[in-house]
Image: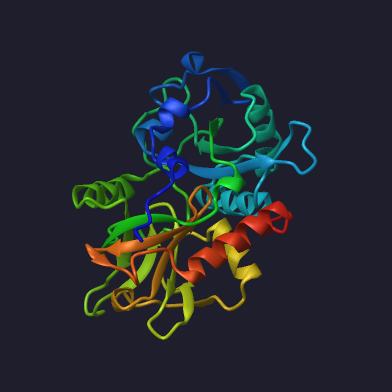
Amino acid sequence: MRFEPTDVHRAQRGSEEEAATVIVYLNGDLLPRDRARVSVFDRGFVFGDGVYEGLRAVPRSGGGGNTRIVGLRGHEERMAEGLREARIDWDVRRLGPESERLLAANSMLDAFVYWQVTRGTPGKGAPVRQRVPGTAMTPTVFAYCSPQPPLDSFAAPACKSAVAIRDIRWEMGRLKSISLMGNVWCAMHADAAGADDAILIRKRRGEGDGLVGEGLATNVVVVTREGEVCTPSLDSVPILAGVTRAILLRERPEIRERAVRASELRDAREIMLIGTTTMVASVTRLDGAQVGDGTPGPVACSLLRTLVDAIRSRRDV
């Protein structure tokens, strides 16, 4: 039996702009998207000088039309680290309440919320192309939300095809920088190969086949030929400390964090991509070859059930 993505998962791959909200958040204000204005000299536009975070919102238990952010503390901590490294001053404790405010303005419950904080715009007369930030600037803070499938729709992992390609991005991969050209290049490479996603391989000179890193916007979990369930450790390759990854590591202690060699992908029983909007997806084809029996495996199905249950039971906080 051949598994195909459900209509829900097809919708996830649709145009995000078409689904994006009418009301956006900009520097504390909620306003129609066509009235949102950012300076062309903003350092986010000129240099890609900023950080971002993506959140999943779900209805609060008990209804009432309210939402909550899944894994909010993890998102706050990760964004705080990025802002600290970038030396941009913004209070991440605003993520939760301001997200709820934005979602309420758009009458959304199940949603994705994108946050972006740039260093801001240089003052009048200040050089625009100066690499080292000059005088103190006020950060530009932008957010939008778009609808997402409800938890009930995740009955089985989505099926994805992927290619394994060299990770050409920078060494600060643990930070969610808005400078995503390397990521875009990898995505275009995967698309040209007819794949849905890419698994990025870190390979240094003389290192052999390299180490598994992450997906384009996900972490990777592998079930090896021997049946070991593992995920790349944060100290083996520069990857994001995914919030979904953290939830599953806490819920499923059998998942081992270690360096995963690229050669292990070729013989893997299962390969999974996990993330905020992806949840748990099965890579059923890698580089054109079938993975396992070409369907979502038992570990992928089990991890998805664990994740959905953890979110419903609020064990993600």
Display coloring? rainbow
Residue pushed farthest front? Answer: 1
Left or right placement of residue 222 versus residue 60 in this view = left
Image: 308 above or below 295: above
Q: Nearer the viewer, residue 109 or 21?
A: 109
Residue pushed farthest top? Answer: 35
Q: Nearer the viewer, residue 72 or 238?
A: 72
Q: Which of 57 and 165 is in front in this view?
A: 57
Residue in the picture at 36% in, 45% down: 180
> Where residue 73 sits in the image (x, y, percent)?
68, 52
> Where residue 295 sits in the image (x, y, percent)?
38, 64
Quadrant of image for the N terminus: bottom left
Image: 118 above or below 288: above
Let me know if residue 234 appears in the view. Answer: no
> Where residue 97 sits in the image (x, y, percent)?
71, 35
Residue in the picture at 22% in, 75% down: 205
> Where residue 82 sits in the image (x, y, percent)?
53, 51
Quadrant of image for the C terminus: bottom right
Left or right placement of residue 304 versus residue 169 in this view = right
